[in-house]
Image (cartoon, helix red, strand yellow):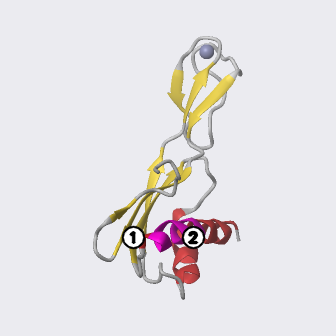
Amino acid sequence: MHEMSIALAVIDQVESAVRPAGATAVRSVRLEIGELAGVVPDALAFSFQLACEGTVLAGAELLTEPVPARARCGSCDRTWPTGLPPRLSCPGCGGVGVELLSGRELRIADVSWHDDAPVPTPTHEER
Ligand SMILES: [Zn+2]
């Protein structure tokens, strides 16, 4: 199941981010999900609950934040919300040289754990 592999990847990333910080229980994870990422939030939440068992994320709440999809025309520079199914030709000039600006995101936006101390998003920019 597609959502299950995403849930596992998310849990993996969160675990490696909170372990060094000494977290023993994660309270919630906030995910940004693009409109075109092909993820069903309910199915993902279900997979997440199952996959959390036995990890520091057990019982954590998964919060999902939809990100609307937008596209830009390469010919006339117009931007528009693509909607679903996505409109990938320019509503202004009919051009098909279209760049997708957003909508494919699948990103951990925030993680919070038992004592409310924010854990940085899993990047390695600091230090
Ligand atoms: Zn155009």
**Residue 120: within the magenta?**
no
Q: Disc 1 to disc 2, how far (Cα)?
A: 17 Å
In the image, 67 versus 11, the foreground residue is 11
Disc 2 designates what residue?
A: 43
**Residue 14: within the magenta?**
yes
First in residue order: circle 1 vs circle 2: 1
Tell me which residue sits at (53%, 80%) in the image. 52
* Number of residue marks: 2
Relative to 111, does residue 77 appear above or below in the rendering? above
Residue type at mark 1 is: Ser
In the image, 118 versus 88, the foreground residue is 118
Tell me which residue sits at (63%, 54%) in the image. 38
Tell me which residue sits at (65%, 72%) in the image. 4
Query: Mark 2 CB in 8 Å range of ligand 1?
Result: no
- Residue 89, how many percent across, how many down? 66, 25
Residue type at mark 2 is: Ala
Relative to 49, does residue 80 appear above or below in the rendering? above
The secondary element bearing badge 2 is classed as helix
- Quadrant of ligand 1: it is top right
- Residue 71, how many percent across, how many down? 58, 29
Disc 1 designates what residue?
A: 28
Relative to 58, does residue 104 appear above or below in the rendering? above
- Residue 106, how many percent across, how many down? 56, 53
In the image, 91 versus 113, the foreground residue is 113
Query: Mark 1 CB in 8 Å range of ligand 1?
Result: no
Residue 56 circle label: none
Give residue 87's quadrant in the image.
top right
**Which segment did they paint magenta?**
11-20
Q: Nearer the viewer, mark 1 or mark 2?
A: 1
- Residue 17, how many percent across, how many down? 50, 65
Q: Which residue is the extreme one toward the front?
A: 127
